Image: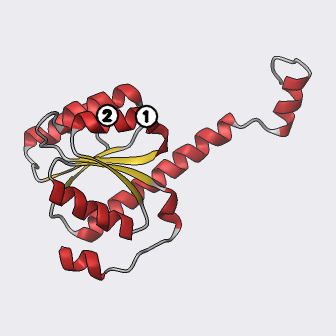
Amino acid sequence: LRLMLYSRRPNWGCLLEHKILLVDDDSLSLTGTKILLEQEGYLVHTAASGPEAVEKFRANYRQYALVILDYQMKEMNGSATIEALRQISKEAYILIHSGDSSREALSSTWKAGAVDFLAKGEDLKVFLATIKSWCLKYDQTIRLLVSNLTPTQNEKFIQSIGLVGRS
């Protein structure tokens, strides 16, 4: 993995604007994954524990296209972290990236609200494709929400003259 990290050329394409919150209590895994994602053009913020992730997410939850977190963490496991993040934003895309692919881990993360589960050590192409697909889904969701919230010229006019609605 280390050779792949340093031999890859950065992909500064359309993904540059996607911010990811990466959470793992294993500093080696956290650093390696952060470098990989940055080489793919993502902006990556990191947290070394569940409580730290919740704090960072609470401060700027709207900026993250995706939260990627480990399941087995000392202070707060992945499921508990997902539940805390869901209390802040029910719309957040949260993906588990863990070495623990037990039935219990899978079940509890799905129940907590994870959108996907990837085993650590899985094919790198699958890992990156999954992240890209969730970031694209984030784009589609945000564009839809923003277009629904941004008033058109007609709606601005209607509001300016004091009408309540239109038919």
Q: Nearer the viewer, residue 29 or 156?
A: 29
- Which quarter of the picture shows residue 52? top left
Q: Nearer the viewer, residue 155 or 40?
A: 40
Could you say where residue 59 lies in the image, as x and y percent from the top left?
A: 43, 34
Could you say where residue 45 lies in the image, as x and y percent from the top left?
A: 36, 51
Could you say where residue 37 lies in the image, as x and y percent from the top left?
A: 34, 63
Q: Residue, x 24% and y 60% (percent of image)?
A: 31
Mark 2 near mark 1, Cβ–Cβ under 8 Å?
Answer: no
Q: Residue, x 38% and y 43% (percent of image)?
A: 93
For marks 2 and 1 on the same chain, the one whose residue lies earlier in the sequence:
2
Residue wearing tag 2: 54
Q: Residue type at mark 2?
A: Val
Above or below 165: residue 112: below
Sort mark 1 into few (<14), some (14-19) or many (20+) by Cα contacts within 10 Å: few
Q: Residue, x 16% and y 47% (percent of image)?
A: 25
Q: Residue, x 53% and y 66% (percent of image)?
A: 14
Q: How far apart are the alpha carbons under marks 2 and 1?
A: 9 Å
Whether residue 32 sits left or right of residue 39 in the image: it is: left
Which element carries disc 1, helix, strand or loop?
A: helix
User: Please, which residue is most extreme toward the bottom here?
Assistant: 7
| Label of residue 131 in the image | none
Residue wearing tag 1: 59
Q: Quadrant of the N terminus?
A: bottom left
Q: Nearer the viewer, residue 48 or 63?
A: 48
Above or below 30: residue 156: above
Q: Residue type at mark 1?
A: Ala
Q: Nearer the viewer, residue 15 or 105?
A: 15
Which element carries disc 2, helix, strand or loop?
A: helix
